């Protein structure tokens, strides 16, 4: 399976680049699964339901987020729209799995693409992060899979895991 991970889609310029370039990249490189970080797609702060759906319609399969996931409050209601539909657009928008489980949304998504099962686990790192805003929890792979909305479709084999990390260093004046 060929996977494309798109880093931080930032505001309208980022969304425009994805719209203009994603179809060609997918075609040229025979990409099977597209994962993108969309937490700053709403003018650099959060993501809205219409923007998430626009990104899905462009061909993104799963959208990850981070500490800006709830900057646009309407996303909380969007998470609740999944309402048991394990493969709805709302269910494919992830918040960090290592945020406390009583917060809205999910940190794990399991799907199938071209008859190949896959899982995306969204974790928030702590480098350069202020930890006051959200409650963090320690996490294990087994706990992540147990907290998923359904039983995994196939056993997780570590040699099939492809970790992707995004680290942004930001300076403050």
Image: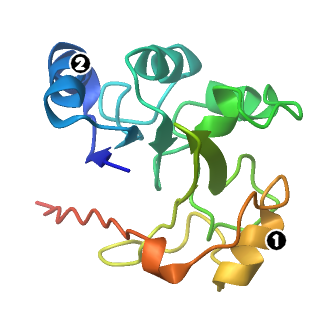
Estimate the spatial distance between the alpha carbons at disc 2 and disc 1, rounded to whole Å. Answer: 35 Å
Q: Nearer the viewer, residue 66 or 37?
A: 37
Q: Nearer the viewer, residue 173 or 76?
A: 76
Q: Locate residue 134 relative to residue 152 in the image: left or right.
A: left
Q: Quadrant of the C terminus?
A: bottom left
Residue extending farthest front: 115
Q: Residue at x 16, y 29 (%)?
A: 25
Residue 53: x and y in percent read: 53, 17
Residue 140 placement: quadrant? bottom right
Mark 2 and mark 1 residues within 8 Å of each other at the beta carbon = no
Q: Nearer the viewer, residue 172 or 103?
A: 103
Question: Which label belongs to residue 28?
Answer: none
Residue 159: x and y in percent read: 45, 80
Q: Residue at x 88, y 30 (%)?
A: 83
* Mark before the other along the chain sequence, 2 or 1: 2
Q: Which residue is mark 1?
A: 146
Element under label 2?
Answer: helix
Q: Residue at x 46, y 47 (%)?
A: 68
Near mark 2 (Cα within 10 A), the count class, few <14, some 14-19 or many ≥20, is few
Q: Locate residue 119 relative to residue 170 in the image: left or right.
A: right
Against 137, residue 81 (above or below) is above
Q: Which residue is mark 2?
A: 23
Q: Is residue 155 visible?
A: yes
Against 32, residue 12 (above or below) is above
- How does the figure colour the protein chain or chains? rainbow
Residue 136: x and y in percent read: 63, 76
Q: Locate residue 19 relative to residue 154 in the image: left or right.
A: left
């Amino acid at each position: 399976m060929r996977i494309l991970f798109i880093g931080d889609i930032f505001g309208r310029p980022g969304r425009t680049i994805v719209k203009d370039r994603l179809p060609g990249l997918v075609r040229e490189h025979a990409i099977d699964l597209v994962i993108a970080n969309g937490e700053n797609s709403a003018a650099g702060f959060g993501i809205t339901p219409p923007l998430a759906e626009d990104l899905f319609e462009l061909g993104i399969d799963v959208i990850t987020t981070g500490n800006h996931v709830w900057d646009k409050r309407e996303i909380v209601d969007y998470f609740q729209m999944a309402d048991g539909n394990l493969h709805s657009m709302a269910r494919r928008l992830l918040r960090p799995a290592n945020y406390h489980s009583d917060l809205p949304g999910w940190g794990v998504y399991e799907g199938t693409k071209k008859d190949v099962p896959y899982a995306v686990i969204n974790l928030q790192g702590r480098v350069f992060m202020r930890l006051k805003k959200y409650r963090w929890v320690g996490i294990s792979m087994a706990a992540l899979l147990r907290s998923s909305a359904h039983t995994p479709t196939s056993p997780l084999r570590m040699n099939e895991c492809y970790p992707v990390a995004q680290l942004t260093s930001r300076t403050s004046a």
